[in-house]
Amino acid sequence: MRETHSWFGLLTLCATASIATAIGLAVVLSGAVAAFAGADASDVAAPVSANGAPSAAAQIETPQQGRAFSGVITDDRCGARHQPASGQNSSECARMCVRNGSKYLLVDGGKSYQLDGNADDLGRLAGERANIVGTLNGNTIRVSSITSGP
């Protein structure tokens, strides 16, 4: 005697197979995305030897050491647009804002970086285009050298 299966059993079998396939694809694709995303060098902790000193691998120069940046030096209060009603040019405004507690900022198009170090040189070139060499940590550049830009 031959048994007949109901349409509900067939529907359950198809739904189970579809769900299992969807979960399998989700796992494979999320693993692929994680593998191709990679990690930024600043997000990875430097290797340390057993005595606490940086290991030889940590002393290898990374692309962020001595990196060159270019842009206009300003302050984090006014940014790229200083108030014309203040009666000051952009250099004077940036220096005044820094004296009042703001930090120097490098603005290049839509990007901006807080600047740390060489305050005298930053003040001298405030409001002007400059070329900066430094180490990027997050959104802050630790300035090692600064020159007037083109």
Image (cartoon, rainbow, N blue to C red):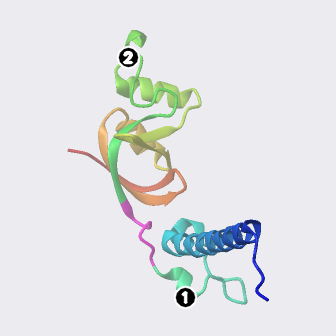
The residue lying at 37 percent from left, 37 percent from top is 124
Name which of mark 1 and mark 2 comes first in the sequence. Answer: 1
- Residue 141, how many percent across, how many down? 48, 53
The residue lying at 79 percent from left, 89 percent from top is 1
Task: Give amino acid for label 1.
Answer: Ala
Q: Nearer the viewer, mark 1 or mark 2?
A: 1
Could you say which disc has been placed on residue 56 in the image? 1
The residue lying at 72 percent from left, 67 percent from top is 7
Q: Is residue 15 magenta?
A: no
Q: Give the magenta-colored segment's residue range.
A: 61-67
Q: Is residue 132 left or right of residue 46?
A: left
- Residue 148, how many percent across, how many down? 27, 45
| Residue nearest the observer in this picture, 108 or 51 | 108
Q: Is residue 149 left or right of residue 145?
A: left
User: What predominant SS class does the magenta segment belong to?
Assistant: loop
Where disc 1 sits, the SS reads helix
Residue 8 visible somewhere in the drawing: yes
Q: Residues within 10 Å of mark 1 (few under 14, many from 20)?
A: few
The residue singled out by tag 2 in the image is 88
Q: Is residue 97 above or below residue 40?
A: above
Q: Is residue 20 above or below residue 50?
A: above
Task: Give amino acid for label 2.
Answer: Gln
Residue 45 visible somewhere in the drawing: no
- Residue 149, how many percent across, how many down? 25, 45
The residue lying at 47 percent from left, 43 percent from top is 119
Quadrant for the C terminus, please. Answer: top left
Q: Are marks 1 and 2 in contact (CB under 8 Å)?
A: no
